[in-house]
Image (cartoon, helix red, strand yellow):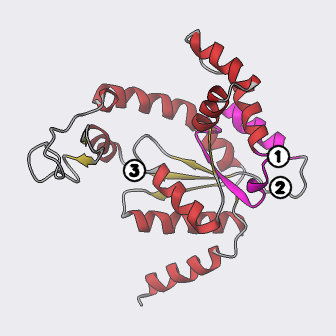
Amino acid sequence: MTATAAETHVEGEKSRNVSPGPILLLGAPGVGKGTQAKELMARWGIPQISTGDLLRFHRDHGTPLGQQAKEIMAAGKLVPDELVNRMVAERLKHPDTAGGYILDGFPRTLNQAEWLDSHLAPDEEALPVIAVSIRVGYTELLRRITGRRICPVCGTIYNIYLQPPRDDEKCDLDGTPLVRRSDDSEEVFRERMRTYEAQTAPVVEHYRAQGRFEEVNGDQPVEKVAADVIAAVARLRS
């Protein structure tokens, strides 16, 4: 075992004894936050809390919060922070969050980050939120997004640059011509990046200023990124 491998092994063992608490995973579209969230869930047995999932749950179950959100979305407006905050507050009451949780898509703005800090502060046993950002270069992200192709029959996902099908833009499993989602265009990606950077920069600085932020290189194999994210969580909790 090399020195680097040995250090990684030691950090991995230490991380098993860490109380993860609330973890915010940050990263631009295409960095692989969903994949890494699953790794953290498996490591510590903690839930992932997605504001998109919360909105759909409340809307589909006709809760009072869901009714409010549905009316707002039907009018073509963004769901305000105050309503999203209330959904998150309700979710954090569930017992499965006691040992920690992974935040996905929240806090997305500085106002949400400040609200979350103040919401957790009264609980003396609650750990503060820590943030880990997954960084991937713009060109690589563009290839991940614009190269994505999907089989409309079986749902298999390919990438013409990184994981191409054997036959030109046809599914390896059933030969169906692959399709590209409309939002996988370069124009849409650029706009999503601009929005992400504008919203997230203040959130990053908020956590960085308090010593609760680390960044890892996402342009590595999935297993290595996962090890780096876990090690970053362990350091931030030490």
Mark 3 lies on residue: 136
Q: Which amino acid does label 2 sit on?
A: Ala
Front-most of residues 10 and 56: 56
Q: Tags 3 and 1 in contact by the CB under 8 Å rule?
A: no
- Is 108 in front, or is 57? 57
Q: Is mark 1 on a helix, strand or loop?
A: helix
Tell me whether the residue at label 2 lies in contact with that at label 1, contact meaning CB atoms closer than 8 angstroms: yes
Q: Which residue is drawn at 34% across and 44% down?
A: 141
- Residue 82 horizontal/vertical position (percent): 75, 25
User: Where residue 29 appears, x then y in whole percent?
Assistant: 43, 40
Residue contact at pointers 3 and 2, CB within 8 angstroms? no
- In the picture, measured across the screen, residue 61 lies left or right of residue 133, that is right
How far apart marks 3 and 2 lie (CA) works out to 31 Å
Q: Is residue 12 magenta?
A: no
Identify which residue, 90 or 183, lies in the foreground: 90
Q: In this view, does 125 lie to the left or right of 28?
A: right
Question: Magenta stretch containing residue 103, yes or no?
Answer: yes
Q: Quadrant of residue 182?
A: top left
Q: What residue type is labelled 1?
A: Leu
Residue 159 shows in the view: yes
Residue matched to label 1: 120
Residue 80 is at least partly visible in this image: no
Horizontal placement of 95 versus 223: left or right? right
Above or below residue 38? Residue 68 is above
